[in-house]
Image (spheres, grey):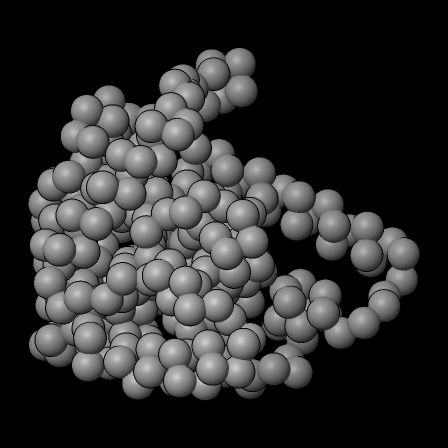
Amino acid sequence: MRDRLPTPHPRETIDVAAPAHSPRGRGDPATAHGDLPFLAGPSSRVAELRRAIGIFFEFMRGFRALHFRGPCVTVFGSARFKEGHPYYQLAREAGALLAREGFAVITGGGPGIMEGANRGAKEAGGCSVGCNITLPVEQRPNPYLDVMVEFRHFFVRKVMLVKYSYAFVVLPGGIGTMDEIFETLTLIQTGKIEDFPVVLLGTAYWKPMLDWLREKMVREGTIAAEDLDLMAVTDSPGEAVQLVVEGARRALARRPAVAVRPSRWLGEASAVRA
């Protein structure tokens, strides 16, 4: 994979959202251009059209930012683990190993697990990418990003975290991480994306969830036993990255990567730094 990784470049920030940071929380007008009014039911036709156009441009700016980043792996996990926590160090090691295999590392761009993975990738000389989300209470991007893209809408951000990845490495996390795991598994299960590896790091953390899936959902017939095979679980970053590499090779064998070159006419020269 090493020959396909773009050379890391100075940090580049692509802002696709106006500031929406407010300590006042959900109902504050500062969030009025984000998900809250969009998901609150019908608005005027003009407002709906304006939002649809804004979402289109948010997608286009995300595509533009990530189109030339090379083969990517997305790392999911909690924002709440501090630098000294073992899970932070696990993410940092995984990020470094992924970078050494030629992958760009994409995260949600925030602190905790995301910071650890981005930090490991950057320290190993790889490309470190963050897809940050604008929230009523500010989530600050971590300082280890070569490219940072800011999104208003969670659903646009989640598309970007999936679209460019050959695999998904998941460390311990909360509700957001669970959402990302199960949405990714749903896309694989239904054939909306290819059967890319989903590797859970931290067996002690994930065992109760996997036991519940097996003992409750499989037993009740709401999922098939083979659906559990969509996930692998390990405590070893090295084993996780090996599974990622093997999965990426299978994906490339099924569908060779299309060579992408920046277009001068589209102003894309700045998207790739030699």
Q: Is residue 271 above or below residue 141?
A: above
Which quadrant of the figure contains the C terminus? top left
Splitting the image into 4 quarters, where does residue 132 fall?
bottom left
User: Residue 93 versus residue 265: which sits nearer the camera?
Assistant: 93
- Seen at 62% across and 72% down, the residue is 30
x, y percent for residue 55: 66, 50
Which quadrant of the figure contains the N terminus? top left
x, y percent for residue 135: 50, 70
- Residue 10 in sight in this render: no
User: Residue 164 versus residue 265: which sits nearer the camera?
Assistant: 164
Splitting the image into 4 quarters, where does residue 271 fall?
top left
- Seen at 47% across and 82% down, the residue is 219
Task: Classify residue 105 as left or right of residue 44.
Answer: left
User: Residue 147 versus residue 63: which sits nearer the camera?
Assistant: 63
- Seen at 55% across and 47% down, the residue is 192
Task: Classify residue 10 as left or right of residue 84.
Answer: right
Q: Is residue 164 above or below residue 37?
A: above
x, y percent for residue 181: 41, 66
x, y percent for residue 264: 47, 14
- Residue 194 in sight in this render: yes
Report the number of numbered marks.
0
